[in-house]
Amino acid sequence: MSSSVPRLVVAAPSSGSGKTTVATGLMAAFAARGLAVSPHKVGPDYIDPGYHALATGRVGRNLDAYLCGPELVGPLFQHGARGCDLAVVEGVMGLYDGAAGEGELASTAHVAKLLRAPVVLVVDASSQSRSVAALVHGFVSWDPEVRVGGVILNKVASDRHEVMLREALEQTGVPVLGVLRRAPQVDTPSRHLGLVPVAERRAEAVEAVAAMAAQVSDGCDLDALMGLARGAGVLSCEAWDAAEVVSSPTHHPTRSDEKPKPRVAVAGGEAFTFSYAEHTELLAAAGADVVPFDPLRDEELPEGTRGLVIGGGFPEVYAAELSANEPLRKAVADLAESGAPVAAECAGLLYLCRELDGLPMCGVLDAEARMTGRLTLGYRDAVAVGDSVLAAAGTRMRGHEFHRTAVEPGAGAEPAWGLRTPQRRVEGFVRRGVHASYLHTHWAAEPGVARRFVERCRTS
């Protein structure tokens, strides 16, 4: 399958330059023109895609060459962009910053090359004038395979400042496709792990996205940007398909041996906002009846629940409310005690502990969790230490850690993963049907995880 979906990658020299504002604003501005816009985010970030979804009305999807491998970037992009008029990809960190010690792997530049997409460089011009030309020249010439098609100048102070910046950039031959003034109304609040998710500030987030769209529409040449997007190279690969990749290579069910769909409850709401769209798509493709629930408000699990998935989020922010929902905590503990499959990542791990910051949680795991001042962040190479509801012993996966909490002990008698980076250690808990870990994984890289989990739901 070949794709000629117009597409842009929004990148920057460094974090904090305004990528999210520009990318989200572009998505919303083009959507306001009546275009179907496909939103994407480079890397493992869960929060930005929420703002992208708000801007476009479509699911925000991640493109991570480390978690999923370079070979899946194109197919996952095709899956998300199918039927769209335009795709906008927000980069991560600086344009050439990738996985530590891995060269260009998982960098914005790497993904742009895999997608054959032109790059728009967002430059924070607040403290420079003529030097902007040297900066842009360096980024344009660093890797000839990366096509920087234009620059958007952000945080420009005045008309005079804009004139100086434009005069300097004329020498680079790189067109200026937008100039944005400082605009406090487009700022989004942050806390210990980045931006506050959309689910926690829906009304304010809607206003912020509208402000981003207005600022970008006023300050950028949308026609020129669309023209640049149409110049993207043809992408020759098949779109990723959950039903196709999750099908067992050894078993093809017939009508006579089809079984009822096991119900899998997936945690959501304000406390559990970190999830990849492909996970629920894979669960459904594997034969599950996927039903969301909110641990902050629902006092019982969905009727007939046979399996439970609790992803990442901010339980530390909502610890009091989660603890106060004693009926649900008991329901989760009872389900786990019955041997039903339970998959928990990061926030889910904390929720399953005996307590979090001194407040009672579900008590499924004999462990205590607490907030710390230390940020744990980075990609990890992992191997399943033993058999679990997610993976057979020896299964290798790549994951990502991102938290400011600690669990004591850090691993159970049966750990979930053995980690090879940044140092060798075991981590997480496997107990009966429970698999709980700090590690965020992307199941598209190992779709057998979803197939195995749903099959265990059927037989448990």
Image (spheres, rainbow, N blue to C red):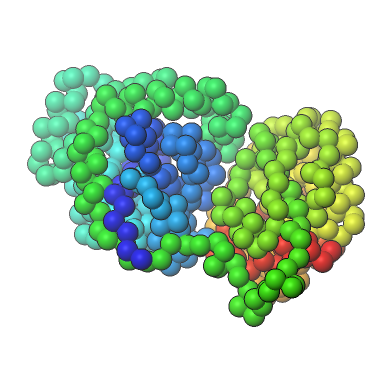
Say whether residue 164 is visible: yes
Q: How many marks?
A: 0
Q: Position of residue 207 (x, y in %)?
A: 47, 22
Q: Position of residue 296 (x, y in %)?
A: 75, 33
Image height check: is 391 above or below 439?
below
Camera-side residue: 398 or 206?
Answer: 206
Q: Position of residue 251 (x, y in %)?
A: 66, 78
Left or right: 267 with respect to 430?
left
Image height check: is 161 above or below 309?
above
- Please tell me which residue is depicted at 66% across the width and 34% down the height of the picture: 270
Left or right: 343 with respect to 284?
right
Image height check: is 347 above or below 447?
above
Quadrant, the C terminus: bottom right
Tell me where residue 102 sits by quadrant: bottom left
- Please tell me which residue is depicted at 41% across the width and 20% down the height of the picture: 184
Quadrant, the N terminus: bottom left
Left or right: 24 with respect to 443?
left
Q: Position of residue 191 (x, y in %)?
A: 57, 31
- Please tell me which residue is depicted at 48% across the width and 49% down the height of the picture: 61
Tell me where residue 422 sits by quadrant: bottom right
Say whether residue 150 is visible: no
- Please tell me which residue is depicted at 18% across the width and 19% down the height of the picture: 159
